[in-house]
Image (cartoon, rainbow, N blue to C red):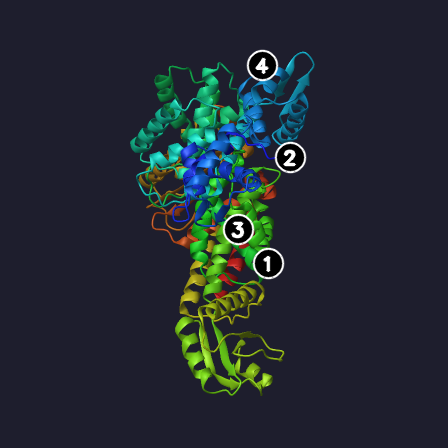
Amino acid sequence: MRKSKLMSRQKEIIQILTKSTIKNPITVSAIAEKLNVSSRTVLREIPKIENWLDENGFNFIKKPGVGLIIDENLENQQLILELLEIENIEKGYSKEERQRIILGELLVNKEPLKLFYFTSLLKVSEGTLSNDLDSIEEWLKSFNIKLIRKQGLGVYLEGEEKDYRKALSNILYDTLEEKEMINLLKDSLGNNRNKDVIELSIENRLLKFIDKSIIKDIENILSDLENQYEFKMSDSAYIGLVVHISLAVQRIKNNEKIVMDKDSLNELQFLPEFSLGEKISRDLEKSFDIQIPKDEIGYITMHLKGAKLRLSKVENDIDLDNLDIKQIVNYIISEVEKDFDIEIKNRKKLSTDLLNHLVPAVSRLTMKLNIRNPLLDKIKEQYSDVYKSCEKACEILKKITNVDKIPESEVAYVAIHIAAALEENIKNERFSVVIACPTGIGTSRLLAANVKKEFDNLDIRGTISAINIDIDNLKRQGIDFIITTIDLEVDYKYVCVNPIFLDRDKIILKDFIHRLSKDRVYKALKNKESRCDKEKIESITSLGADIIKILENVKVKELESIDSTKSIIKEASKIFAENDEEAESIEKSLIAREAISSTYISSFNMMFLHCRNENVFGCKFGVLRLNNTFIEEEKKIDYAIVSLIPENNTQMQIDIMGHISSEIIEKESFRKIIKEDNESNLKKSLESVLSEFYRRQLKQIMEG
């Protein structure tokens, strides 16, 4: 039999393991730290190490959750070290490592590389290299990158800058372990980010592709910026931006050209994040003595936009995007509730959590930015029904982000929030039970007392004899299941436990209740009695009054000559104002809102002017139509929507105007009426839109 040969890293691991004992096992993470590699890399080497130790007659023990041990005396431990010295150690890489190195070299080098360069670097045959290149070629297809092999010239890649970046980032993220990724995604680091942890994470991911001395300076630049502008990125967004900038700096230092699509760049320049990207670029230029091209500022802006930064603190700021997304959140939750025919009890918390997630998610999708989800496979496996339901519900996101398919990673994040809410439903389920023992007395009372002490969601309705069980009577009493001390031969739900109620029995009962709760939550039909109390009547009356006020005050105004967006805003401030003072106040509010981020929607040649104002009483909806198309700074404007709400608004008023916003964005027919039809037809169309909203809200209020 051919003996196993060791690689140099496997030798190093065994040398570390010889210092282990039964009392002092060595963990995989400790070995990884000593070798400055990831735990995943160490785990990949363990099977080969185990084979070598077994072939040489040494006892190797793996204790999950404890560590690794070579269970030998000091004499044999020394013998292992001597064997390693005379062992023919192969200097080489695993298939995964080889392909990662080849990919890295190809992605950071624009010139063709000879096959000999790789065979010499990796110490492999041309046949092995050819197989590696086949696998790499297939992998690169998903990023729209071509691998070109030309006789006499070498190997090189063809693709666009954005695709190179996606591929490089993917390689970097693949080296990050799942546990590490989960920790980074948590929001619990507080105000002081743990820089040592983050720097170590980045260093592990960057491998050999960039100069690690760059990282610290980039972190300092971003940290100063956060303090200066009083904003905070999530740790995942922060790390993603550091990785992106590190790669960009390295590429610029290598004199590689960075190019972005002109139309995309022009659109990004109007975002408030672009000025922040320019500030970052100026700091990078000073720090690294390089010239940052405008295209790279565009890519940095995309990352900042994906993180959905708030550049100023505005309390209760009403943002068009957020209003749209709030409607999407409600739609997703409602679709899931329909699928499972349930009502999610903690809907308010779920709505908030989903809104916080979807605001940056929509920006990511719009900008075609990828996000990884280390829990994807687990979510699809453990919550397959929830994932499938969310996948259908998330189809609505395609309409506003203009993507062909919502990535599985994004769907899984939505599914995590939904699953968590459903688990809360499950925890709150209560059951009526009876205890069944052979005699119906004695130990049954002891068991009932112990069960009651451990499970406060069980209503123990009494004890019965396990010999004579009256199923009809149990059904009449509404008993959900039987807790019994012996196996039963009855067609009724039951769980069997020991009368002493040991720890094992507690686990059995807990698991049984959870499965029963899950089944009830996911599949049980809702049978809620609709009751109309004073509070509901007030909500319905208020809703109707708000809608009627909007319909009675719809305004349409034709504008003959416009020479700036400021003049459009000035006209917008007048149509609902009673006097010049009110018009001036509304104008200031509209300008302040526009300063936060432009309300211009390029795909519709439209401005969506909206704000809160103390001189506005009730919600207002109006349209300004420009008789001649107006162009300013490449913004082509045909018309403007005017949407106003009171300073002291209600949630219902926000929801109403948010619904109108959604209908305008989603329905071309409604936009056409707004843009071209007379005021009478516009009112009819708006009445139809708000009538549907009224019916839906009425149903929710009555069932609430």
Q: Give the number of the mark in front: 4 or 3.
A: 4
Amino acid tagged 3: Ala
Q: Which residue matches tag 1?
A: 339
- Give the quarter of the figure containing the N terminus: top right
Kindly identify which residue carries mark 2. 2
- Of the two numbered discs 2 and 3 on the same chain, state the one appearing first in sequence: 2
**First in sequence: mark 4 or mark 3?**
4
Residue beneath label 4, please?
111
**Observer-nearest residue: 303 or 92?**
92
Residue lying farthest top? 152
Asked if residue 621 can be seen in this view, the reply is: no
Query: Which element carries disc 2, helix, strand or loop?
Result: loop
Cα distance between the residues tagged 1 and 4: 54 Å
Given the image, on which type of amino acid does mark 1 rest? Asp
Q: In the image, which is nearer the foreground, mark 2 or mark 3?
A: 2
Upstream in the sequence, badge 1 or badge 3? Answer: 1
In the image, residue 64 sits, relative to residue 573, either above or below, namely below
